[in-house]
Image: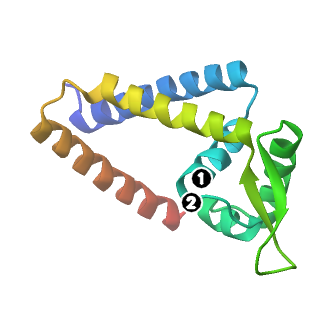
Amino acid sequence: MVDKHTTALDKVLHLSMLVATDLARFEQESGLTSARVHLLWTLGLVGPGNQQSLASALNVTARNVTGLVDGLVTSGHVRREPHPTDRRATLVTPTALGRRTIGELQDSHRDLARRLFGAVPAPRLHAFVTTLDETITTFERLMEKQ
């Protein structure tokens, strides 16, 4: 007899493998690591910020952000600029290449969302999103206990 809970988990794991494979392909094509892509994505959402605020947004240490920013400066995606009101801080700001990459990431994200879910009726999509939210919350709670 097939356990419906195990079947659901198997499908989530299969989906996560597909996403990981797609991300690995993107990393190879773009030359950007997933962590650097995540930093660029965050800059696209929140705009320029200091490394501490970016670390908070990414839920990593400031030291991790320093390494990510160093790599993105080297690749020409971001630059460090003086903070306009805090002379001790610097802002991480996307360059023209960074803005173009962020735009491409956002366009690709919207396109994939439409291609994956565009034909799904709204009530089913809402139920799916609700189930995912509940699953994520439960998984986060389980991870905290470990």
Is 138 placed left or right of 33 in the picture? left
Name the amino acid type tagged 1: Thr
SS for tag 2?
helix
Q: CA distance from mark 1 to mark 2?
A: 6 Å
* 1 and 2 marks in contact (CB < 8 Å): yes
SS for tag 1?
helix
Q: Is residue 7 visible?
A: yes
Give the residue at x 67% y 49%: 39
Query: What residue is disc 1 on?
Result: 42
Query: What residue is disc 2 on?
Result: 46
Residue 139, how many percent across, how many down? 41, 54
Name the amino acid type tagged 2: Val
Q: Residues within 10 Å of mark 1 (few under 14, many from 20)?
A: some
Residue 7, how many percent across, how many down? 29, 30
Q: Is residue 10 visible?
A: no
Q: Quadrant of the C terminus?
A: bottom right
The answer to which image quadrant residue 60 occupies is: bottom right
- Residue 67 is labelled as none
